[in-house]
Amino acid sequence: MGTRKYFGTDGIRGEANRMPMSVETAMQLGRAVALVFSRDTHRARVLVGKDTRLSGYMLEAALIAGITSTGADVTMLGPLPTPGIAFLTQSMRADAGIVLSASHNAFQDNGLKVFGRDGFKLPDAVEMRLEEVMERDPASLPLAVGADIGRARRIEDAAGRYITHLKTLLRAEYDLEGLKIVVDCANGAAYNVAPTLLRELGADLTTIGVSPNGVNINDGCGSLHTDLLAAKVKEVGADIGIALDGDADRVILCDEKGDIVDGDALLGMCALEMKDTNSLAHDTVVATVMSNMGLGRMLQREGITLERTAVGDRYVVERMRAGGFNFGGEQSGHLVFLDHATTGDGLVGALQSLNLMLSRQRPLSELASGMQRVPQVLESRYVLSRPPIDSLSTVTARIRDARKELGEDGRVVVRYSGTEAKVRVMVEGEDAPMTERLCESIMDAFGVDVGFTEK
């Protein structure tokens, strides 16, 4: 694969109105998607959705201009969770779906993700093809004129179509009558979908983060900031708390005691249920290198194989499809139930967890207690540059020393973020103070070799 200029591990992402997340980039991508996905005389049909960021309106207009300028047609979905856009791309037989969202990032960032006709994120080769078209001189592109210019229309029932799909995932014999639920929508794309879904299924619902104003997405709420959720669960005596991120492709739960249940715990408890019901393909779960060692140990005891991938739900999904597996995810809360969704879906994960609570008639705290977590420390810092890690002498020496000290009972994972200018360090081991010390030592080495910034 050639060097990428625009696409990272999860589409194009950056500060809005700055390269690469500029109006020009959005227009270029719109043209590229329309041209790459057109076939002979077939005019490409492209869905466009977004989250609630202020910059979404600006970038949406540029994206639509780019698509229609090639003669392709656009269907605008408005604010909708990323997995909802993936679902509608597939169900409406569109040629592609484009999402304007920077997921869990702060409001000043934005991003562009592209789904293919099948509802899956694009393979590397297709993203490289898009970049090649984006780099062309616009004057060389076959732009439309006159009546051939593309049309743009908005559908008003996009959220309703997605909600109808989600309702089918709660088992037919169940409803949520009598369950107290708190949902935190992070002032993001699910601010309307999630409350509507849960109320229509009968929940006694308390909401957080359902008043987006363009600048408050992920601000002190959602799956990255769960203190508010935990406090509210205890305050109202809820049975469960559900925290989504800005585009609702990840979920973190809170049990009835106010304790947080992360993606690893959800992977564990759902995998056991799927194995017991003979619905876990090949008795295998796919997770990333960031998942806790305790998850692997728990699954091994139950005869379930854990396969690890690089960080990023796209890599989890790629491995699942290649191996014929149907369940996987990330510690951060991306849960991929491939029988029901083509990408991580926070609401699908929440509904499957509710199915489990209702079928077992046990509280979430008990269901999530099976995994004994190994002490794990995660740190992230903004860096001034991102040279190859193996070229950094101080960093590599500290990593080597840490792995030697941990031995076979620990792990070290050091990587650059694929979506932000950050380095991330994870150290895992049986001795909590040791893991903290080693993580800090490695992070300090980046200060020596690269240098930090406040962004």
Image (cartoon, rainbow, N blue to C red):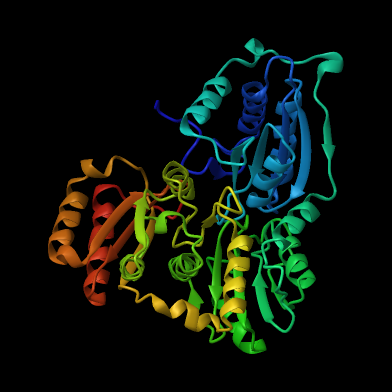
The one of 397 and 291 positioned closer to us in this rendering = 291
Residue, far top: 140
Task: Specify whether 250 is left or right of 377.
Answer: right
Where residue 137 appears, as percent x and y from the top left, is: 60, 15
Residue 22 appears in view: yes
Give the left or right position of residue 4, taking residue 96 as reference: left
Location of residue 361 in the rendering, given as x and y in whole percent from the top left corner: 59, 83
444 relative to 240, above or below: above
For image coordinates 57% across by 85% down, the residue present is 256
Q: Nearer the viewer, residue 200 or 391?
A: 200
Q: Which quarter of the rendering shows the N terminus?
A: top left
Q: Quadrant of residue 290?
A: bottom left
Point 56% across, 49% down: residue = 343
Q: Nearer the viewer, residue 42 or 189?
A: 42
Q: Is residue 218 left or right of residue 152?
A: left
Q: Residue furthest front?
A: 278
Residue 221 shows up from this direction: no
* Residue 7 vertical position relative to residue 34 in the rendered view, above or below: below
Query: Quarter-wise, where is residue 45 in the image?
Result: top right
- Identify the residue at horizontal 60%, vertical 87% (top origin): 234
Total labels: the figure holds 0
**Image vertical order of residue 2 relative to residue 287, above or below:** above
Question: Going 72% across and 43% down the picture, which residue do you hit?
Answer: 91
Residue 310, placed above or below residue 128: below
Q: Position of residue 412 (x, y in %)?
A: 25, 59
Instruction: Find residue 183 and report its horizontal and vertical position in percent.
Output: 66, 72
